[in-house]
Image: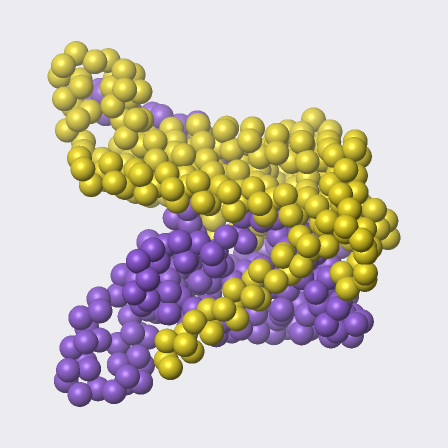
Chain colours: A yellow, B purple
Amino acid sequence: MKKALKIFWLAIVLAFIYVPILVLAVYSFTDASMVGASGGFSFNNYINLFADEELRNMIFGTVALALICAAISTVLATMGAIGSYYSKRVPKTLLNTANQVPVVNADIVTGFSVCILLIVILRISKDTFIPLGIGHIVLTAPFVYLSILPKLKQMDNSLYEAALDLGATPAQALFKVVIPQLIPGILSGFMLAVTLSLDDYFVTTYTKPSTFDTISTYVVNATKGSQTETKTALWALSTIIFLIVITAVVLMNVLSQKGGKANEKA
Amino acid sequence: MKLRFNRSQLCIPYALFLACFVIAPLIVIVYYAFTNGQGQFSFSNFVNFFSSTNTLGTLLYSFALAFSVTLVCLLIGYPTAYILARSNFKKKYVLLMLFVLPMWINFTLRITALKEILSVLEGNISAYPFLNSVIGMTYDFLPFMILPLYTSLLKLDKSLSEAAEDLGANKLTVFLRITLPLSVPGIVSGITMVLLPSMTNYVVLDMLYNSTYIMGSLIGSYFSAYDWNNGSMISLVLLVIIFIVTLVTNRFSDKDAERGTVL
């Protein structure tokens, strides 16, 4: 009886989470212009999504921005984390505190403050993509830093020293001994950076060139307009992203289970 | 000694980056908040904010909305995290994934989906602005509540509650006096992840046709009006709120449950 109640509760929460996404997914395969309306089966939304140049550019731009910024964030924050881990107490505390600021800050304040500094005061044109890029790095790098720090703490320090004793240069020891051990943290930090960048609306709005849109800003503008064709094409986009996320999560689970088993053996 | 010095130098680029693009913008915000359009020192933005019933009303509305959203997230999230953490299911982690997976789907697309469902259920969705905003934000932020709660409940030592039961406590007492107090770090970190975004994420309101302003919408409208000074004042007010929340929550900090360890 109690168990049934628990399952019932979980089912209700899952329904709350998934019903909207799944209903939209079903309707994305019809020619209905709104949920609830009747419509026949059709791939039109998917065809529109890939045929429309504006939509294609928008998706490509969003992904490119996320990957480039996440890559820069990862390099910067990895170096930062390694450096701060071996720094003295004061610089370490300062860096950790500064790193914490964008994490606890509201995205909108981060975006607005970066916009004022770069665009209003330094007069860097939005069209150079520099404010947008910097904004996204500010947003994502601190999370990469946070996901690498625990790996540094777990690391055996004597390995680095041993590498040096055996004749490696500090650079070699860094690249061949330290960084390989950080790779799980670096990878999960990179993935987190990508997802944060993809999901961002506020930093993007305040720093983007007026002709450039990411998925978030595009969707918000599209819902204000009355173009049903764009609206229903976005249903297709939502469904595709949902499928990608599910596939990624399943893959990650399978891979991590294999990794876990390998670790158990070792 | 020289080698250690080399390694710590690696953080210089990142330190410079943080100084230029995280710390400097904050200083700029404070400067702009206390100057007028001509760059002269002035309290007018401050007075504007605290003397206008409009902006104060917005602040109150933001708090009301944020507290409601946080409460609803907690009421839905806690039992969910509790059941997940206590289940005997072999692959708990997979089950948890089901609940936090929407986090990786763009939130504007998720709100679009929710909006379509609400339109079917309610007909005219602009008739229930507050309710819909609470539903929308709960929909958006629930994973961020479940995750830290789950982490802290999972770490909780089961033998403590078993001991309490052996000593004669009933289930309710065990929950109220053992489980709940020990999960406070998770609760606090969940609250911080939901409270602040729900004071500022005005996009959810816009998309669900709630035309009432929250703090975020004020920044948005000052941004569109190129009014950097008043916009900075609102940002400063938000920064102060964030600072207070951080001070309070640091007392209960639980490093494993922070947002940085989401993946």
Q: Residue at x 73, y 41 (%)?
A: A46
Placement of B184 over or under A188, stated as above or below? below
Expressed as whole percent of the image width and height from the top left, the position of residue B112 reads 70, 56
- Give the quadrant of the N terminus of chain A: bottom left
The foreground one among A14 and A114 is A14
Marks counted in the figure total 0
Residue B224 at least partly seen: no
Expressed as whole percent of the image width and height from the top left, the position of residue B171 reads 28, 84
Question: Which residue is most to the front?
Answer: A41
Where is residue A244, by image quadrant? top right
Question: Which residue is most to the right?
Answer: A226
Q: Residue at x 39, y 48 (%)?
A: B261
Placement of A116 over or under A167, stated as above or below? below
Q: Residue at x 77, y 64 (%)?
A: A36
Residue A223 at least partly seen: yes
Say whether residue A213 is left or right of residue A185: right
Expressed as whole percent of the image width and height from the top left, the position of residue A52 reads 80, 34
Say whether residue B189 is left or right of residue B53: left
Where is residue B128, by image quadrant? bottom right
The foreground one among A243 and A93 is A243
Expressed as whole percent of the image width and height from the top left, the position of residue A219 reads 73, 48
Where is residue B158, by image quadrant? bottom left
Say whether residue A103 is left or right of residue A225: left
- Give the quadrant of the C terminus of chain A: top left
Placement of B114 over or under B163, stated as above or below? above
Q: Residue at x 30, y 79 (%)?
A: B175
